[in-house]
Amino acid sequence: MTAKVILNPYAARWQASKRWPEAQAALLEAGVNFEVEQSKEPGHAIFLTLNAIRQGFNPIIAAGGDGTIGEVVNGIMTAGEEQARATFGIMPLGTANDLVDNLGMPKELDKAAQVIAANQIREIDVCQVNDRFFINNAGIGLEPYITNLQQNMTRTSGIIRYLLATLKGVAHNPQWRMKLQWDDGEYDGPVTLVSIGNAPRTGGIFFTVPAADPFDGKLTFVFGYIAGRLNILRVLPQTMKAGEGNYVEHPAIHQHHGTWLKVSIVPNSPSHADGELFTHGIHELEFRIHPASLPIISTK
């Protein structure tokens, strides 16, 4: 069966376009039979994925970063309502490649191509916020506020861009009041951030939902309120710790597992899914989990 590669040439600030010949050679060397199409604008990869599935291509391979992966996942999950769900593969050409690292998959292109050729399948959970799907992480409040800042930075690149945007976002210190409701709990009050994770790491270095597991069938989220820029800066290094010492140990930060989460926000907050802003201001959000709903080509 022929695979369809959805290439986002802009991923990693056009580095994906430069690295595509290497990725293409790796796939050919691994014996993967494929055709490729390039996305041209935000959201285009969703359309290309839907069209590829309707034409009978399988698997669908995302060649790009976490945002590209998120769009291809949206295409597969949407098409799955119409016909058998396509298998999903990854050629990592992004900046952070969070999902790939979270899954313990190789970032070297020759090894990634060999994983695709081996076609070992696992059924991974997929999350949903309103009508959008995501596979790694989503956020409300400070996290997408920072995402917006880093996407507008043009003089820096790589992981340093995420870190500088974080420091700038903390300095701005935006404020929200939110009402959260989930399976067996609720909260109403000031909130600095809400991070919803299918996997623990985002932004290359931040373990914002350290207990998230993309194979446990649970929606895992973290929320909290820390007053003052200096206090936020004191907690910030703890978000970079994967295990002991992570910021969820702070008494003002709370981590929960469930199957759904509803959030009301004042004032409106930006929100992102898999690192891509899907709104600059929203008042109501509803999250839920789709356990073991996507066949992904993985290493274990």
Image (tube, grey):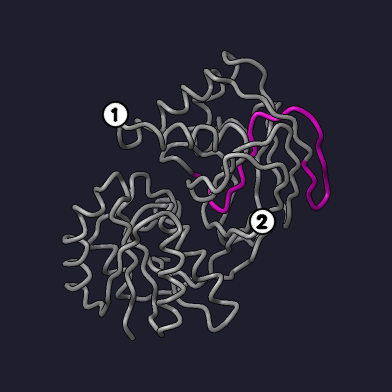
Residue at the extreme front of the image, as rendered = 41
Q: Position of residue 147 (x, y in %)?
A: 48, 37
Which residue lies at the image location 38% right of the left edge and 49% below the top edge? 97
Which residue lies at the image location 51% right of the left edge and 25% below the top edge? 169
* Mark 1–mark 2 distance (CA, rounded to whole Å): 34 Å
The answer to whether residue 284 shows anywhere in this view is: yes
Q: Position of residue 255 (x, y in %)?
A: 68, 40
Q: Which of the image's four quarters has the C terminus?
A: bottom left
The residue wearing badge 1 is 155
Q: Which residues are magenta?
A: 180-201
- Circle 2 Cα neighbour tier, 10 Å, few/some/many (<14 / 14–19 / ≥20): few
What kind of element bears circle 1?
loop
What kind of element bears circle 2?
loop
For the stretch drawn in magenta, the main secondary structure is strand
Quadrant location of residue 191? Answer: top right
**Of the image marks 1 and 2, the number of the one nearer the N terminus:** 2
Q: Position of residue 276 (x, y in %)?
A: 48, 47
Which residue lies at the image location 34% right of the left edge and 56% below the top edge? 64
Taking the magenta stretch, the answer to whether it contains residue 41 is no
Quadrant location of residue 291? Answer: bottom right
Q: Position of residue 290 (x, y in %)?
A: 64, 65
189 relative to 70, above or below: above
Residue 142 left/right relative to 36 = right
Taking the magenta stretch, the answer to whether it contains residue 181 is yes
Nearest to the observer: residue 130 or residue 90: 130
- Circle 1 Cα neighbour tier, 10 Å, few/some/many (<14 / 14–19 / ≥20): few
Residue type at tag 1: Arg
Q: Which of the image's four quarters has the N terminus?
A: bottom left
Residue 62 left/right relative to 258 = left
Residue type at tag 2: Asn
The residue wearing badge 2 is 130
The answer to whether residue 106 shows anywhere in this view is: no
